[in-house]
Amino acid sequence: MSPPLPDLETFPPLRDWQRKALVGYLRRRRDDYMAVATPGAGKTTFALRIAAELLADGTVDAVTVVCPTEHLKVQWATAAARVGIQLDHEFRNADIHSSRDFHGAVLTYAQVGMAPAVHRRRTMTRSTLVILDEIHHAGDSRSWGDGVKAAFEPAVRRLMLTGTPFRSDENPIPFVNYERGEDGLQRSRADSVYGYSDALRDGVVRPVLFMAYSGETRWRTNAGDELAARLGEPMTKDLVAQAWRTALDHRGDWMPQVLRAADARLTKLREHGIVDAGGLIIASDQQTARAYAKLIGEISGQPATVVLSDDDGASKRIATFAASQDRWLVAVRMVSEGVDIPRLAVGVYATSASTPLYFAQAIGRFVRARRKGETATVFLPSVPHLLGLASEMEAQRDHVLGLPKQKDGLDDDLLERAQREENAEGDLEKQFEALSATAELDQVIYDGTSFGMGAMTGTPEEEEYLGLPGLLTADQVSVLLNKRQADQLAAKKRQKAAEPAAPAQREAPPSMTAGERRNSLRRQLNTLVAAHHHRTNLPHGKIHAELRRLCGGPPSAQATIEQLEERIATIQTL
């Protein structure tokens, strides 16, 4: 006996973007429809409402959801059951046919790729709506893409969802529409787009502050040479990668110092409005995850929950943590995209994964808003590539066909070798032995703008930023960060004025390092931007964007000394 149809009258109310997209979908009634919405915006609710509409009017008799992981299968089935749509998340390829007790089934892309003929027969047996969640996974491998195409070509309707940037490669994603641009390249075309900036304006997602930590790192190469470098300073790609991984070594001082700062921030959020705030540490491998869990347990005084990818019991541990008041969750590289733990408000990005796709998935775990004013804070190494991604969080990327991966900077081949296996040490790690690393707050990034003058860990200057209130609107965050920076500049000037005059015979002070010079220019640029804001009332982000348009180059957090000097000269003429 078939289950009853969902009742549209009892369906939860839709957000504005969901309602507009639903009207557009029902008006067009096309076989294929793609919705791009930032993580936390409510793609699941939107898709289930479309499923309910099509089941209710008889357009389809069944629903199939395809998602990336086993945990998400459970999450989809639970969300669907709440609105009267029964989906079988335990369906296996060997079952051949779906039980009539359900409206359909939830599958993984790997499951479809292994037996596309089984799912093609299921799709042909009943008129089916197929929901392809995080559709970019259909481009992860030829077998997955071919399997999805073969299995779901007979579907009556196909709804594609994604909330993260696409990559550039040669593999077209099944059922996605492409349009050729003036440059001759084909780009994916979405039917509905709801970006992070839109969601932030509507209060659907939280403002995210990125606290970037630099510091001195030392390691020994396989040739026995000892090298030292400061995170964030210009250096070769190999040196960046090795300094980065040295900082992430749990045996050094960098990670304990950053974890101590992150736990202090979590405490501050709990004391000032987000009483159940939780934290997530994203690690690169299982051994490191366990080491981080031990560290944060010692710092916070509470044991951390450890989730190792999709191992047995992972879904239960995630669900238990989500419903608890526990402080910290540690995941191997990340809790899978789409995993819903709304109380996560503090993150530590302690992994070497560096693609925009991965970064967006990870940050998406922290942006879901529950009530007005909640903010999120993510701690990360002061690595130029990561600073650029943090500054460009609002960027929307389409899938581009025919553009080599390396050309647009969307992949990092050097680090990719160390990311293939969660348990593998990788070639990169064998090249050196981490010796020591210390941390200090380099800058705070918000809305594409860099704030702060640098601060050692455990100092009042660092506390000024760790102690920011947890309940702030997006505009209040910007105002408060500008005030913090202005107060620090004023204090520095007072301190300098109070110092006794140097004797005439005193030697000239040593010249600044490249890092100190860049920080000084960044502060000068931010001061000029703030002054321009007060004259014109233009938002800081728009002023920075206009300077980038006029001068070229990356966001200020990632800009070179020469680029910063050019922008300073330009804004002085505006």
Image: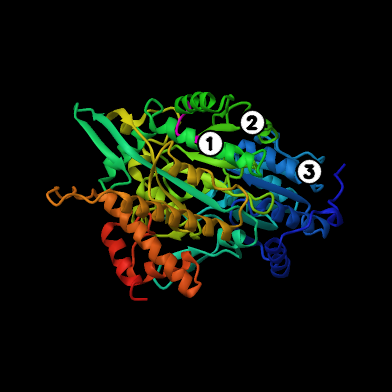
Q: Is residue 54 visible?
A: yes
Q: Amino acid at mark 2?
A: Asp
User: Residue 522, how many percent across, how many down?
Assistant: 35, 57
User: Residue 481, how many percent across, how many down?
Assistant: 49, 55
Residue range corresponding to the magenta coloring:
282-286
Q: Amino acid at mark 3?
A: Ala
Task: Work out how far the residue at label 2 is from the one at label 3, CA to CA, in angstroms.
Answer: 27 Å
Looking at the image, residue 52 lies above or below residue 101 = below
Classify mark 1: residues with Cα within 10 Å, few (<14), some (14-19) or many (20+). Answer: some
Mark 1 and mark 3 lie on one chain; the one further toward the N terminus is 3
Q: Amino acid at mark 1?
A: Ala
Which residue position holds label 1? 264
Which residue position holds label 3? 81
Task: Work out how far the residue at label 1 is from the one at label 3, CA to CA, in angstroms.
Answer: 39 Å
The answer to whether 235 appears left or right of 328 in the picture is left
Q: Nearer the viewer, residue 215 or 177?
A: 215
Residue at 75% x, 46% y is 80
User: Residue 157, how many percent across, how many down?
Assistant: 69, 58
The quarter of the displayed image where residue 46 is located? bottom right
For the residues carrying marks 2 and 3, which lies nearer the camera in this image? 2
Looking at the image, residue 116 lies above or below residue 251 = below
The answer to whether 4 appears left or right of 555 in the picture is right
Q: Nearer the viewer, residue 29 or 416?
A: 416
Could you say whether the residue bearing mark 2 is in a helix, strand or loop? loop
Q: Give the quarter of the figure containing the C terminus.
A: bottom left
Could you say whether the residue bearing mark 3 is in a helix, strand or loop? helix
Count of numbered circles on the image: 3
For the residues carrying marks 1 and 2, which lies nearer the camera in this image? 1
Q: Is residue 283 visible?
A: no
Residue at 27% x, 32% y is 218
Mark 2 and mark 3 lie on one chain; the one further toward the N terminus is 3
